[in-house]
Image (cartoon, coloured by chain):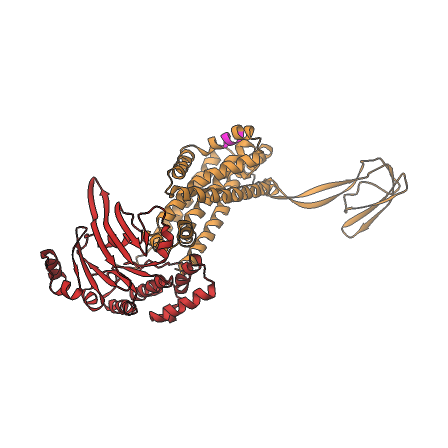
Chain colours: A orange, B red
Amino acid sequence: MNARARTWPWYLLLAVILLGVAASLWGATQRIDYTWRWKRIPQYFVYRGEDVATVPADGRVEEVREAGDEAVVVFVDETGERHEFRVAAGTVRVSPGEDLFAGDPVGSTFAWRTGPLLNGLWTTLWLSFFSGILGLLLGLVAGLCRVAKNPTLRGLSVVYVEVIRGTPLLVQIFIFYFFLGTVLDLDRIVAGVLALAVFAGAYVAEIVRAGIQSIPRGQMEAARSLGMNVPQAMRHIILPQALKRTLPPLAGQFISLIKDSSLVSVIAITDLTKSGREVITSTFATFEIWFTVAAMYFVITGLLSQVIQWMERRLAVSD
Amino acid sequence: MIEVRDLVKVFHARGHVVRAVDGVTTRVEAGEVVVVVGPSGSGKSTFLRCLNGLESFDSGHVVIDGQDLADRKTDINRVRREVGMVFQQFNLFPHKTVLENLTLAQQVVRKRSQDEAEAKARALLAKVGIAEKESEYPSRLSGGQQQRVAIARALAMDPKVMLFDEPTSALDPEMVGEVLDVMKTLAREGMTMVVVTHEIGFAKEVADRGIFMDEGKIVESGPPGELFSNPQEARTQLFLSQVL
């Protein structure tokens, strides 16, 4: 048996299959007569926003002069006060000597602005970040309770984990927003972050429990035999080792959280998914937007999993 | 130093009851070296683990330096500081360097300063002959070196008693000697030691007393010269004929 078997035919087959999938997707859209308008998409990432400059009071234009790619409009109001407006050349709508009333436009300035897709992405990122941190703390506490000797703590942790893992996240978000949000008068953002954090916490608790239980019993015994009490042994011996082992699954849980955060769009938090829906209502470019949104999620989660792989390699070196 | 009276430890395993330690009574005087031998499953390790409370027991008394472990008011952590333990599987802390393995409990439990703890640790590492490995991680050390670090780690707490739970059983044969040498030095320095081992040679050389255990009971005990060379009980004779 040749150890270095030829693998390139299989890669060729892979490429053929992927191309086939792409071609059939393209063929399917041809059949329903859909017009792709990819050109419309970039403006929803960034666009040049126009600000119209207006005069604050009635008065007269004294002078209009060009200065490079800008134009300067000098305006004197009724009280004799001078105002200077700097606007983009070519947008000047007034001429010298013209009488203006308060609120009349003089010209426009342009600036780059982030569009709804980038704003939505940012919302998704910080939403995931805060609920991730909160979920990590919750999960750490619940995981520690899960391995505690005290039956009350253990019971609380089991109930928490089982209830959360046994119900759909979407339903939990509704409960947090409509029930807890009403009872405790929570903002929708707070309700969303809490729902995601409580959901992630249940899974983190299981990861933490597994991590702690994966540390050989001898470690705890050695620590105890040196006179450490349980909290000291946990802090100095068990948790540092357990957390190192749980880093990869924790990071995986965080990637899941980013994807799950798309569900908070149902309580009108303008995250990436909801931004996508909003853009569709104004463009009708349904296919393009959803593919774009999917690609944006994929880039974020892909980057994150690269970072995790790098971290895993770093940790393996110190072993 | 150690007084054990009618110690009983029962395991409940899959419906049937195992009396791992069944009415053991013995004393270990200060400075005495006691070696416990016996076939596997005879309860000798469980007995040893009861001596520092790693295993809870069902009835009887274990009195260490005047403190009864059966008394609920006894602070077990306070007792354990005075009782060092060395494990079969070393149980070094893999995420700490050799030096940190020795200093951690000194700082956390004994509240020593870092300088004081490190000075103590370096002196002990020199004593067990691996001073040059202080900044290595345990995984880079051989089994014999790891066990010597484990002994030094226990000694760093200045224990009054040292317990050894089959300290050489997990070692390659060529590394057994270096660990036994460290233990012999300790014994000569007057450390109170209880050693569970299969090393009959070591027992004959340094032990003040030998105990043979089987089925949770002390079958026979006495000076090692007599116990291991001229045992009285048939069970002891059979065991020794198998291991020697």
Horizontally, residue B202 falls left or right of residue A316, namely: left
Residue drawn at the location 9% of the way across and 57% of the way down: B234
Task: Examine the structure image and report whether residue B50 is included in the region drawn in magenta.
Answer: no
x and y, in percent, of residue B228 in the image: 14, 63
Residue A76 seen anywhere in this rendered image of the structure: yes
Q: Which stretch appears magenta?
A: A173-177
Name which quarter of the figure residue B211 lies in. Answer: bottom left
Horizontally, residue A99 falls left or right of residue B4, namely: right
Query: Is residue A215 or residue B191 the one in the foreground?
Result: B191
Query: Is residue A49 or residue B28 the one in the foreground?
Result: B28
Please, what is the dominant secondary structure of the magenta stretch? Answer: helix
Name which quarter of the figure residue A105 lies in. Answer: top right
Horizontally, residue B165 falls left or right of residue B92, namely: left
Image quadrant where one finds the C terminus of chain B = bottom left
Residue B244 seen anywhere in this rendered image of the structure: no
x and y, in percent, of residue A273 in the image: 53, 37
Residue drawn at the location 45% of the way across and 43% of the way down: A141
Image quadrant where one finds the N terminus of chain B = bottom left
x and y, in percent, of residue A167 in the image: 42, 32
**Figure check: A173 above or below B36:** above
**Figure check: A255 above or below B210:** above
Looking at the image, which residue sits at the far front?
B66
**Figure check: A84 above or below A273:** below
Horizontally, residue A268 falls left or right of residue B54, namely: right
Looking at the image, which residue sits at the far left?
B234
Task: Examine the structure image and report whether residue A174 is included in the region drawn in magenta.
Answer: yes
x and y, in percent, of residue B145 in the image: 32, 66
Query: Is residue B180 or residue A209 the one in the foreground?
Result: B180
